[in-house]
Amino acid sequence: MNTLAAYLEFARVGFVNILAFRLRYYTGIITYLINVCVYYFIWRAVFASSGPIAGYDLPQMVTYVSVGWSLRSFYWNTIDQEMAYEVIEGKIAMDLIKPVSVLWMWFSRAMGESAFRLILLTLPTAAIVALIFPVQRPASGINFALFLIAALGSFALMAAINFMIGTCGIPLKSILALIRAKYWLIELLSGLLIPMSFFPRRLQIVLDWLPFEHIAYTPLQIYLGKLDGRAALFALGKQWIWVIVLFVLADAWWNRAVKKITIQGG
Amino acid sequence: MPEPLIQVRELSKYFRTFHRREGIWGGLQNLFVREYKTVKAVDRVNLSIDRGEMVGYIGPNGAGKSTSIKMLTGILVPTSGEAIVNGFIPYRQRRQYVRTIGVVFGQRTQLWWDIAVVESFKLLRRIYEVSQKDFDARMEMFNQILGIRDYLHTPVRKLSLGERMRCDLAAALLHNPPLLFLDEPTIGLDVVAKHHIREFLRAINLEFHTTVLLTTHDLDDIEELCRRIIIIDHGTALFDGDLQVLKERLLRTKQIKFVLKDRAQAAGLTRFAGNGVSLEPVDEMTFRLRFDRTQVSASDLIRQLLASVELRDIVIEDEPIEEIIKRIYSGEASLSDGDAGAPAIGESEFGRR
């Protein structure tokens, strides 16, 4: 499996590369802590004048926010931005002269980066958050194991979506506005800001048919034990089917875009 | 006869560019109705290159050199025509094909910007599945000529352009490809770095029989490395053939540069001017006689010169190749049938179509 070795090497280089930006991650921890604080106080204020909302009480909501933001620090990646810059600078040509799948190359790189984020961002953030806020333990050992698998799924979904957005840079040239729009759409539709059960019933039905809620909402439901046993496995199955579907789509979209490529500069 | 390594037929690339209207009203119009125009970056180019050749691909800025290289390396899909390189169709079989080539773009790097050079090399070793033994042997050879060992552990962003270029060249050849594309490999480099790179290219061509296609604006690259050149402008090939043949055909003027022994004799030089000969002073004691070699014989001129003045030094020079190329670009020199003994365009001694 020499090809696998090549992609593992991409992951390793992705990891090493990000070491050059260590400092960014120390400040990253603070950013994530601030986010958790903000949502903690908002939800405390909301629940002060109300009973459980859409099946959530305050301790669950605090756990949702804390675990949610820790999870986000792991699955988040910037493939789309990096691709956008590569297109603008014409560096994308250098990817095409390598005998590798460009999709898997980016995926492997992002994996190396996420491994780095896990150690330097996610774990410290989670540890500090758990010290400051009353975060509940996972519903059970099995729930936690399934949650970890779902977290990998979140990463894969995010990678595929970002790769597709990044590929839009080839026909569109400048996609910085698109990236910003995607940012807010994902924060909202992934369930990171508000659980899906808070959305209007009809919207929930529509969103149930889309991949986004599997990025944050599904793993968090499993963690909290709101999805148990069979229901959890079913949700996990749905999430990973979406992973496959999005990768197939990403591959097709890339192959289409690359035929129309024009290289900027020289 | 063996198949040529690169075979290109009627290869074209047209770009559709969006024409922007000016002013506020024009800007508003742009939002709704777009005007496009087609630019023929490369227009029906034919070429055929054999194994082991080193070919210079030259032309003014925007002539279509880079676009051609990008089609041949599988990055761009041609609008029409076909290319077979190393037995592959580059833009259709990209992943298998690029395994068999090395590419260096002088203005870009394939090395990772923020990490040590050696990390990029390790990555490339995996990508191209080079064994550790081959890897070590090649690194040793690259180091001998390019002297890259000293900065293998430096991040690329801290390297000078010359150092980076040497590393990029080594990176492109790590898997010992039979074919190497170089797009302006010496751009912006100092004399020493240029020398290293040329030396290296000669060495790998000699040792591994690597075929090299290089674009450049530095004609010294061409003169030192390539026997054959292809000149392209406005997307079409103007000349394809031996550099010497081009010189023979287009070399019009020669010049004699000489240094007088005695300043007083300078006055007597004026009689040489005229009749296809021009006299240019270089400094107090040095002068240059420039003449049309088809009208004036160099030996006659020298004889006359020696008979009338005393010289300390004398040199006979050809017109620099830059001058010839400049005339071709500006359209002053014609390469078509009108020129005495000129082969038709696109039909060189290497062409076999």
Image (spheres, coloured by chain):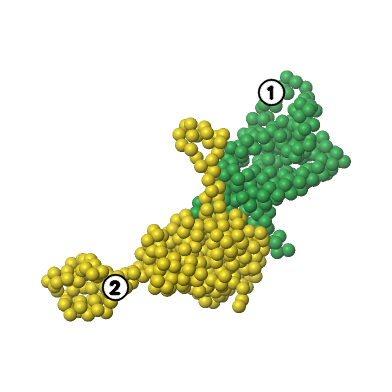
Chain for numbered disc 2: B
How packed mark 1 is, by other alpha carbons closer than 10 Å (few <14, some 14-19, many 20 or more), is few
Chain for numbered disc 1: A
Residue B162 falls in which quadrant of the image? Answer: bottom left
Residue B41 seen: yes
- Report the residue at 49% width, 34% height from top: B26
Question: Horizontal placement of B278 versus A116: left or right?
Answer: left
Q: Which mark is residue B325?
A: none
Amino acid identity at mark 2: Gln
Q: Which shade of the palette goes to chain A? A: green
- SS of the residue under disc 1: helix
- Which quarter shows the N terminus of chain A? bottom right
Q: Residue furthest front?
A: B338
Instruction: Please check whether the numbered discs 2 and 1 fall on a single chain.
Output: no
- Report the residue at 65% width, 31% height from top: A37
Q: Nearer the viewer, residue A240 or B203?
A: B203
Report the chain shown in yellow. B
- Report the residue at 33% width, 72% height from top: B318
Residue B67, horizontal then vertical, whole percent: 53, 57
List the residue tagged with mark 2: B295
Residue B32 falls in which quadrant of the image? Answer: top right
Q: CA distance from mark 2 to mark 1?
A: 99 Å
Q: Nearer the viewer, residue A162 or B245?
A: B245
Q: Residue furthest right?
A: A230
List the residue tagged with mark 1: A45
